[in-house]
Amino acid sequence: MASLGLVFVGQHVLNSATPVTGGYNGRRTPDFELFGFTFTDSDPDLYVLGVPFDRTERLWYLGLVLAGLGWFFARGVLAGRPGRAMRTLRDSEIAAAVTGVDVPVYRAKAFGLSSMYAGLAGVLYALSIGSVAPESFAFDVSVQYLTMIVLGGLGSAGGAVAGALFVTALPLVLDEYSGSVPGLSEPGSDGVSYAEASRYAFGALVIVIILIQPAGLAGIARRVSNRVRRGTRDSPDDLAAPA
């Protein structure tokens, strides 16, 4: 609750700091350049295998590379000693302190690590839309991120990626096939829009995941993988008695 409360405090501060943030209207993002390679539409046309690579395509592939590096780094952190310490701290602060985990230090490390990912994602988001305003980071965005983590699986880098893909893709899929899905209607009409339907689906899925599989999509994937491995080890050929 304290973390969610910081969302409203942060919005108030950002809206008030007009000389820095631009207030409610926000600020335009400057042209981005990386190692002499610009991410603007003003460059000469760049074609790769006949496909034009303008600002949107360049930012998309940059985000894809950074997302892959971020997943690889998070996976390494979780697999090492810091990840074990953070998992112990998440489950029980007393148990973490007894086993030698410096609770305040690892709290600060977890906060700094999550802030690094949030800052990088915020930069890419601002570059993709061309501007940034405090209203872009409202309460519903925090709820959406929480939904991604719960559905994907707490403490799993792969689960976080799967949850983010699912939460991002479902509204787009419902929008694409809203005419074929019974009960959905255009936004602003009397019926249920695809955005509302996706929120209902997320709420129902969160309840189901918490009741049935608290580990989320990552836990389901691990369970299926374990069953497949057990089935391979216990195949009929291996269990057959010698003649």
Image (cartoon, grey):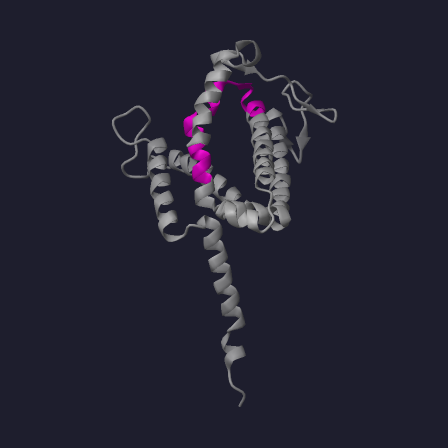
As drawn, which residue projects farthest toward the left?
190
Q: Which secondary structure type mostly characterizes the magenta part of the structure?
A: helix
Q: Is residue 158 visible?
A: no
As drawn, which residue projects farthest toward the bottom?
243
Q: Report x, y in % for residue 47.
A: 67, 30
Residue placed at 41% from the left, 52% from the top? 213
Q: Was residue 233 drawn as part of the magenta stretch in this picture?
A: no
Q: Report x, y in % for residue 194.
A: 35, 33
Residue placed at 54% from the left, 18% from the top? 131
Q: Is residue 185 visible?
A: yes
Tell me where the magenta segment starts and ends, as one range. 126-148
Give the position of the N terminus as an image quadrant.
Answer: top left
Residue 41 sits in quarter: top right
User: Relative to 224, does residue 174 appear above or below in the rendering?
Assistant: above
**In the rendered view, does 39 fall on the left or right side of 200?**
right
**In the rendered view, does 177 fall on the left or right side of 126?**
left
Residue 169 sits in quarter: top left
Closer to the camera, 175 or 94?
A: 94
Q: Was residue 139 drawn as part of the magenta stretch in this picture?
A: yes
Residue placed at 50% from the left, 18% from the top? 133
**In the rendered view, does 184 fall on the left or right side of 100?**
left
**In the rendered view, does 8 fall on the left or right side of 68?**
left
Closer to the camera, 191 or 165?
A: 165
